[in-house]
Amino acid sequence: MQLPTFTMGIGDRFARQGLFQLAAFQQALARGTEVHPVWNKSNREHLTVDTQPGSVRAEADAAVKAAGWNRPYFVDADHINLGTVDRYVDSADFFTIDVGDAIGGTCINGEVAAFTERHRDSLRALDLSRLGVDATLSPDAVASIACKYLPAVRQAGATYRRIVEQRGNRDFVTEVSMDETDTPQSPQEIFLILAALADEQVPLQTIAPKFSGRFNKGVDYVGGLNRFAIEFEADVLAVAAAVRAFGLPTNLKLSIHSGSDKFAIYDAVAAILKRHDAGVHVKTAGTTWLAEVEGLIEAGGDGLAMAKTLYAEALDHIDELCAPYATVLDVQREALPASATVKAWGATSFRDALLHNGACPRYNPNLRQLMHVAYKLAAKKGGLWFDLLETHREIVGRRVTANIDRHIRLIFG
């Protein structure tokens, strides 16, 4: 199964917005820009809202059929590992194998020495001189990288082979993810990780490294933009060099996780992709859920009341909601308005605080991050929440489409 050049992961917490999500890709296609949707939902999200993996496949297939979409699309088992993958083998055709927890694990006796001997000269294939970066490393440095990442690569291989065993002759796309780690990977590390994955015979088509800076949920990038641009371009070159050196799939590309709303980096990403004729996979994470809340606020009445209730409950359960996302949230609690303040707001005030618009003085990224992780509370509303989404379907749907279209336009045109 061949992953196209440009793909976008579109999370949908409650599997209600598939048709409106797909409308953004149809609009892009009408403009001459072909981007392919990848519906994704992690095991954590399924457990949080008590859904099954098959619901994502059902949503995607129904949307594609209703819209007449005749181009490739995918369903991603997002952030799975050997312990969780079995639930997804029948419904997914894109598997994001998360190996973050295995980085720095225990190596098998002799594997570091064997890898170092095998790849001590491989870095000669990585030329970063155009960026003013010397890509060479000593054998000791190569051995240090191997010691850190080989356990993770071994886990990726085991998970990949488990998927093959379970799916038989049904093709699928493989991504390896190591973005939820403490430190970014250097381009040399990415190159050697890809060497190890080639040794492990994992035919990955996309890799998700950790980049420098903060990629917090639902808000803009925080970090040095020049540093990110150099880093991203070096990673693009590392991927291309690894494809040539190790016989990996020719369409192998970078994946940007927590890519939702990272508008500050999109210009650099777009320019670098064009410069190197490279592809990318970008995940918009849970911003469809936020677009649903924005739509209900705009609808006023019972929709606005629900949004206020969810915010008040989120404040009461802030520790519980934020804990699972601690590495990708920076909520300054002192900057969150009191629930009584929000209760007194009209639709415009609440919308302006939540909607990601840095030019608006009322925009509150702390409130937005808290609401981003509050979908668990909406799930507990059950039929009441779903009835509101249906009652205000058109208003909510417009917000969902506009949200994804904004990302597509800024990255892909």
Image (cartoon, rainbow, N blue to C red):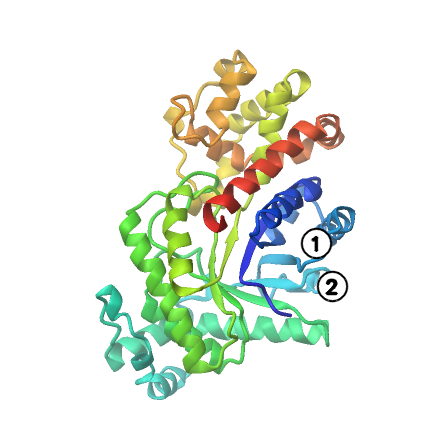
Q: What amino acid type should be assigned to the residue bearing mark 1?
A: Pro
| Residue 73 sits in quarter | bottom right
Q: What amino acid type should be assigned to the residue bearing mark 2?
A: Asp
SS state under label 2: loop
* Label 1–label 2 contact, CB within 8 A: yes
Location of mark 2 (residue)? 90
- Name the one closer to the observer, 48 or 345: 345
Q: In the image, is 220 to the left or to the right of 175? A: left
Is residue 375 among the parts visible in the rendering? no
Q: How far from the left and from the top, in percent, is residue 76?
A: 62, 57
Residue visible at 60% across and 32% down? 399
Mark 2, other Cα within 10 Å: few <14 / some 14–19 / many ≥20: some
Q: In the image, is 350 to the left or to the right of 289? A: left
Residue visible at 37% across and 70% down? 238
Q: How far from the left and from the top, in percent, is residue 118?
A: 37, 88
Picture mark count: 2
Q: Is residue 149 above or below residue 42?
A: below
Upstream in the sequence, badge 1 or badge 2? 1
Q: Quadrant of the N terminus?
A: bottom right
Location of mark 1 (residue)? 53
- Name the one closer to the observer, 258 or 51: 258
Is residue 59 among the parts visible in the rendering? yes
Q: In the image, is 130 to the left or to the right of 368? A: left
Q: How far from the left and from the top, in percent, is residue 297?
A: 59, 22
- Name the one closer to the observer, 296 or 67: 67
Mark 1, other Cα within 10 Å: few <14 / some 14–19 / many ≥20: many
Q: Is residue 363 above or below residue 109?
A: above
Q: CA distance from mark 1 to mark 2?
A: 9 Å
SS state under label 1: loop
